[in-house]
Image: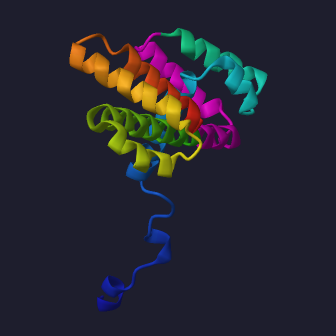
Amino acid sequence: MQDDDELILDDDLPEGPSRSELKRQAQERQALIGRVLALAPSEWERLGFDERERKALAEGKKIKPSGARNRQIKYLSKILDDDALAAAHAFLENRHSQQLEANRVFHSLERWRDRLVAEGLDAMGPLLAEYPDLDRQQLRQMILAAQREQTEGKPAGAAKKLFRYLRDISGH
């Protein structure tokens, strides 16, 4: 009797992922499909979805968020190719990281513009160290014009022009 209690057969142990893990995977897959539906139909073809899959995606894109759309996403989850979904996931992650980088650069340029307007010509040195291709004379004129606008209480036309110049010269 004691041997039976201590003996655990390998056949009794569960194999593979648990039910909860399978549900999590299904939810992640459906969330990815929801993001794929937000893409343009031209991108679906580039990502390797075949004609039948693109047709089903187009149908799902037309449906407003509702129970019907959820059913369509579950259907898409069954028919979509794993490789194409993996490519879509990589594409979306890459696009997200590019967007984050663009936002970081944009905010950095905004801070430079604000610093240039606030500190004036004293802030030119550090900026020129970071962006050596800037035209010193043009930059100087833009800074003075933006400062003059600010002291006179005029709309920020020169500050916007300064920002556009910084954005253009930085390559973003």
Residue at x 71% of width, y 20% of height: 42
- Where's residue 67, x and y in %? 41, 16
Residue at x 59% of width, y 23% of height: 39
- Magenta segment, prevailing SS (helix, strand or loop): helix
Q: Is residue 24 above or below residue 73?
A: below
Who is closer to the viewer here, 55 or 169? 169
Who is closer to the viewer here, 85 or 26? 85
Residue at x 69% of width, y 38% of height: 84
Residue at x 63% of width, y 43% of height: 86
Who is closer to the viewer here, 87 or 24? 87
The answer to which image quadrant residue 104 occupies is top left
**Is-magenta flag for residue 82?**
yes
The magenta-colored residue range is 64-91
Residue 29 can be seen in this image: no
Residue 21 can be seen in this image: yes
Exactly how many numbered labels are in the figure?
A: 0
Name the quarter where the N terminus is drawn: bottom left
